[in-house]
Each structure stands twice: as C-alpha cells, then as structure tokens.
Amino acid sequence: MADQIGYSQKVMEHFMNPHNVGVIENPDGYGKVGNPVCGDIMEIFIKVKDDVIEDIRFRTFGCGSAIATSSMVTDMARGKTLEEALKITRDDVATELEGLPPKKMHCSNLAADALHAAIEDYREKQKKE
Amino acid sequence: MEERIYLDHAAAMPVHPGVARFCRQFPDGFAGNPSTIYREGLQAQEAVATARERVAALVGTSAPDSIIFTSGATESNNIAIRGAALRNRKFGKRVVASATEHISVLNPAKDIQKGGFALTLAPVDRFGTIDLDALAAAVTPGTVITSIHHANNEIGTIQPIREVSAIVHEQGGLLHVDATDAAGRIPIDVERDGIDLLTLSGNQLGGPDGVGALYIRPGVRVQPVLVGGGQERGLRPGTENVFAIACMGEAARLAGEEMAGESKRLAAIRDRLIAGITGIEEAYLTGHPEERLPHHASFRFSRIEGESIQLAMDMLGIAVATGSACTSRTLEASHVLLAIGLAHAEAHGSMVATLGRRNSMDEVPRIVGAVGETVKRLRAITPL
Ligand code: FES
C-alpha cells in the first residue's frame, strides 16, 4: 500500500516492549545521530569482545518507528561480529519489522546509522590504543 | 477489554444521535432536485431552505440567504479567500491571515500570491492570541481581506474577534472568520461581532462529513471558484447535496439548543484534565489558560515525541492527537506550535485532547493515569 500509515504488528510489539533500552557505562563504542528530516535523536552503546558485539543498548527520542527500529537493530547486531553488524542496512531492519510505512523509512536509517557510528567509534578508539 | 476513550473530536466528530435519528427519518425513496418545480423538487427545496434557516440562526444572522452550502470547511475557506480577494481586487491586493490559521486558509492565501496578491502573516503571542497591535500594523489600507480563525484547533485559543473586526473595518477591508472549531461550542453572532464571511463545518457541529457552509454578509461580493449551473447563488454550482445539507441543518439546530449546557459540562471535564495532566513532571498546557474552547485541552511534554505518545495512548485504549513533526505529511513541526514560540524539539512532544458528548468526568482519572504512564515509559527511553 503506497500510502499506508499504520504500523505492522511487529513494529507495535517492539514499540510497546523495546529490547536493549538503556546505557552502558564506559562503552567500547558510542554512536549518536540526529534525524535531519524530523529532528529526532538516537544513541547506541556497544560492548565489544573479540570483535563480537557482546552487549548493546540504545536510547531514542522519536516516533514509534524510530523506537521500534532501534529495538530491532540492537537485537540484530547483538552477538554479531563488527563486520557482520556493519552490513545491516535500513532495509534489513525494515524487513525484520515486517515493513514500515514509506514515510517512516527514514527512521530506520537513523537506527542503522547510529549502529554504524558506534562501531566506527570503537574502531577509532582501538587505533588510538 | 476496557472501553475506548475517544479524545480527538477536532479531527472527526461522531454524528450526534439526534442528527442520526433525523437522517434515518428521511423519507424512504426521497429524491428531488431543488432546481425542479414538481413536488419532489419542492420538497428538496424545502429541506435545503429549512437547513439554511437553522444554520443562519446558529451564527446569529436574520438573513438565511447569506448562507451557502459547500462540501466542507476547506471549500468554504477557499471560496472566502480566493473569491473575495479576486472579486474585490480593485480595493487592494494585500491579504492578511494569522500565523496559526488552518492549512485550508493558509494555502489558498499563499496560492493567490501567484495572482499578484501579497500575503502578510500576523503573529500571535505565546498563548496563541493574535497580537492586535501587530495586526493593526499588518492591515494596510489596501488589505482586501483578513482571515482570522475564531479558535484554533491545535491549542484551543479563542481570538478576540470583535477587536479584530474593528481593526479590519477601520481600513475598509473584509473580515473572514474560520469558525470550524468554535461554532456550536461558543456563541457566534456575525452581526454583533462584525464578521463578513464565516466558515462552518457540518461534521464539527455533529453532522455528517462532506458538507459545510459559508456565511457571506449581504452586500459582500464574492466571485465563484467553481463555475457551473448557478446553484447557491452561483457561488457553489452543482446539484445540492440535499441529504447532507438537511442533516447539517439539524446538527446546527441541536448544537444551538445544547451549546450552553454541553459547553459547561465539557469545560468542567477539560479543567479537571488540565489540572491532572499539568501535574505530571515537565508537562505544560499549550494555548490560552482561560480564553480557550470548552472542549479543548492541549499539552506538551519535554524530552519525548508526540507520535509515540499517541501510539502508546492508543495501546491503552485512548485516542488523542499530536502536532509532532513525525506525524505530519511533510515531517515538519506544527506551524501553530512554532508560531507560539516553541522550539522544534518542544513542539515535538505535543498532545491534544478534544472532548465530545460521550466523554464524562468519570474518564478523567483513567486518562490522566494513562498519560502519566506513557510519559514515564517514553522518558525512560529518551537520550535527552
Ligand atoms: S523519528 Fe520522526 S518520523 Fe520517525
């Protein structure tokens, strides 16, 4: 449906009970991105061990879709290697959520971008050490 | 399952049970084009004439012919602004509107700039009340039409229409008032208030969708936006939507009859809601604390976003509105909330509750509780 505005069951589940909410004290990587479209903000914290994302948390100021995609992307990244996690795209997140209304696709960008930013941050820190 | 609580009457009103009864009693097999002279046609004519009288009575005019029926408030606003500006362009080519007008006023006002008209948006203060000094400066001698809504649908603020009228008429131009949200809720008297054109929505009176009306003061010239068969004094051609018009007439009659009692009842519920919700941490009323529509309560909450408030409330069985950028078609923040001076991020956390006849005082604790729970849940997720 081109102008669907309602959310899938899956989105609503993640919205109502988001997974991986919170902060990690002294994270190995931290990414924070703002949504240039509507002004929302998302941050992701990761803990990395042997190149694998061991723990991941997020906090989001945004719409239902932004919250659900944060929850989903953190679920998807947990336990993955950094290489694998970097390959997660906004379309993957949307697919896992059984689709997003077209107008809401930009929110899933935010989630993927925040994840990638956290991984970048981790790698930067590694270089310095 | 707990009963749903519907708090978005500004978006759509349930049809008033009295209107529904009236509509059902419409004679089976009713047909009739009001432009014909056989009996069916005359009956249709009669039904439209009765509706016209009832709408006229609601807005305080003794001239039913000053009412034309349209397809709704959007069309009425378009006819008022385009039609009056174009027909009277010799008077001047400036249009003034308040910054918080509905989009169906702002867009025709912007659109006629292509025809060489200039548009000035008059500012409002932090409560959403039109700044009368700024308005007086904006309304120049060549201002052909000024459009100020009677009350705002997002923040509930009621405008001082009589003062506005005095300012506009001092320069000799026309005053259009969009009364979509005010009619049937607060008294309107086009003659006493000095209104030249007035927009009404059928649905907002408790009638069906797809019908509205425009009051045009006798003697005010307006040119049609659509041209065709000459119905509605040539201003709204096309065979009349007799059924919807008759139902709107009944809605206007009932609204007039019940307004005083119902507005008082709703205002009491509204005040309780406002007291309860503004008791939540970092929750603020938007719009005017006193000069506001009796059924209207609007808020903003720091550090959380409106669509997620709306969704979470829906899950708790309550339908509310929001002006958040995330819910708008354009993903832009509400122009109303920006006009009252809120920052983009502040405008994000808005929630609007508009009451109707099925709401009761008993619902207030559940609503306040649900808002509190929602705010707490979303604040636990926010990075701000
Ligand atoms: S975060 Fe604003 S639309 Fe999704």
Image (cartoon, coloured by chain):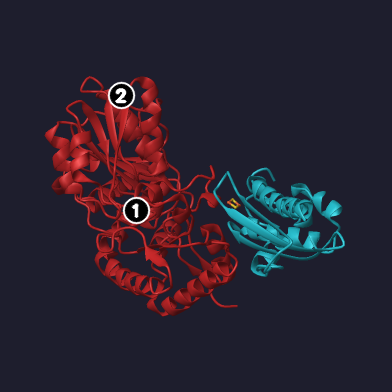
Chain colours: A cyan, B red
Q: Mark 1: which amino acid? A: Asp
Residue of label 1: B181
Letter of the chain that mark 2 sits on in the rendering: B
* N-term-proximal mark, 1 vs 2: 2
Towards the viewer: B12 or B60: B12
Q: Residue at x 67, y 43 (%)?
A: A2
Residue beneath disc 2: B86
- Residue A126: mark: none
- Kindly indicate whether the residues beneath marks 1 and 2 are on one polypeptide chain: yes
Q: Can residue B179 be seen here?
A: yes
Q: Quadrant of residue B172?
A: top left
Q: Nearer the viewer, residue A17 or A23?
A: A23
Q: Quadrant of the N terminus of chain B?
A: bottom right
Residue B306, horizontal then vertical, whole percent: 51, 59
Q: Nearer the viewer, residue A39 or B151?
A: A39
Tell me if residue B38 can be seen: no
Q: Residue at x 39, y 58 (%)?
A: B206
Choose between B204 and B375: the one closer to the eye: B375
**For residue B86, above or below residue B1:** above
